[in-house]
Every structure is written in structure tokens, then in C-alpha cells.
Image (cartoon, rainbow, N blue to C red):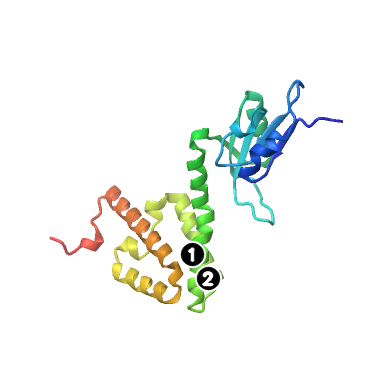
Amino acid sequence: THRADAVVLAVPDARIAEAASALATSDADPPMLVGHTAGAIGLDVLAPHERFGVHPLMTVPATGADFRGAGAAVAGSSPRALAFAHQITDALGMRAFEIADADRPAYHAAASIASNFLVTLEDAAEQLLATAGGDRSILVPLVRAAVDNWAAHGGEVALTGPIARGDEATVERQRTAVAERRPELLPLFDAAADRTRALAARRRTSSGAPDPTRAGDA
């Protein structure tokens, strides 16, 4: 039978080592390459195979995804393995970059915040808006504009809203509404408000602008 030149293990992270160990090693020259698509773990779990990793930095729902233009974290235990990882990303139209194994958990956490947690935030917004008779569609242009502005300018410039203006009275009215209508969302609201205040403070520090919440101070 024909031996595969390479195998990609697209399995849950906890199953990668088991799946890799189930693949027989051989004395073939060159040996079969074994890779995974995990973002948070390195290549050691694929030992003793000659190994590579390709993690598409793209959300992949059950309906599929278009990878063109997306980033991809690649790694290889040898120049040949790394080159094969680049072949995969090139074929899919992705932009490859290398991430050290020690940096992978932080890299993957950033990806989760940017994608998974964003969906969680938007779902919370949708649930709260529903109590006022609105639906998801009216939030979509706002979300897209906010993401586009962040992509173009970064968080300090893109931030708008009552916290950015120092309008804490409005924030308190918002908080009261959340507590009354969807109290399970209050911890999320408070955590997001705290991080937004920190971002607003960072922007003031960068620009030298005064703190609007202390405008009346001597």
C-alpha cells in the first residue's frame, strides 16, 4: 500500500498525542510528516515523528470558512517540515507567521479574546437589546464599524461612548438597566466597563488630555 507523505491531525488538543502515537513510524526516507492544527500547544506532542503545525487564525463554524487572507501560525521540527507547513498556507491563501512554543498559549488566548469572546459580548448585547424590543440586525453596522475602526487605528483611537467621554452618570443608568433586565450579565458588564475605563485612561495618558471625570477638581 502507498504510504502517505504527510498526515494532519485535526483533532481536539487533548487527543493529539494519542493520535500521533497511533501512527506507525518507519525507516522510510524521507519519513512521513505529522502535523496538527492546534494553536495553544507546541510540536512535542507529535514526537517522535518529523512534525509541523499549522493553526489558521480564523473562525471556522460548521458551515466552513474562507481562509484566504487569514493569518496562520506555523512551526516545523525540521526545515522540510516547516516548508510543508508553508505549502499548506500558500495553497489556502493564508499569511504564515512563526510563533515560538513558549508563546503559543498567549497567542491562542489573544485569538480567543478577539474572536470567541467577541461573539460572547455580542450575544450579551443581543439579549439585552431584546428586552427593549430590538434585534441583532440593528447592532450589526455598529459592530462592524467598531471593529473596522479598531483595525485601522487601534483601541485608543477607536474607543467611543460614555466611558471615553467620562460620562459616569450614563454608565450608572446602563448598569441599573442591566441589573434589572438581565442580571446574569452584570458581572460581564462590570468587567467590560473596568477594562474600558483602563483603555480610556491609557488614551488620556498618551494624548496628555485631562481626565473628564475630574474636570471640576482644583
Secondary structure beneath dot 2 equals helix
SS state under label 1: helix
Instruction: Left or right? Give the position of 31 relative to 47.
Output: right
Residue 2 position in % (x across, y down): 84, 30
Name the amino acid type tagged 1.
Answer: Leu
> Is residue 160 shown left or right of residue 166?
right
Label 2 CA crowd tier, 10 Å (few <14, some 14–19, many 20+): few
| Residue bearing mark 2 | 138
Asked which quadrant contains residue 53, the reply is top right
The disc labelled 2 sits on which kind of residue?
Ile
Position of residue 184 relative to residue 30, above or below, is below
The label shown at residue 54 is none
Structural distance between the alpha carbons of marks 2 and 1: 8 Å
Task: Count the numbered circles shown.
Answer: 2
Residue 143 drawn at (x, y percent): 50, 62
Q: Position of residue 75 (x, y in %)?
A: 59, 32
Instruction: Give the residue drawn at x 49%, y 52%.
Output: 113
Residue 133 lies, with reference to residue 127, above or below; the image says below
Residue annotated with mark 1: 142
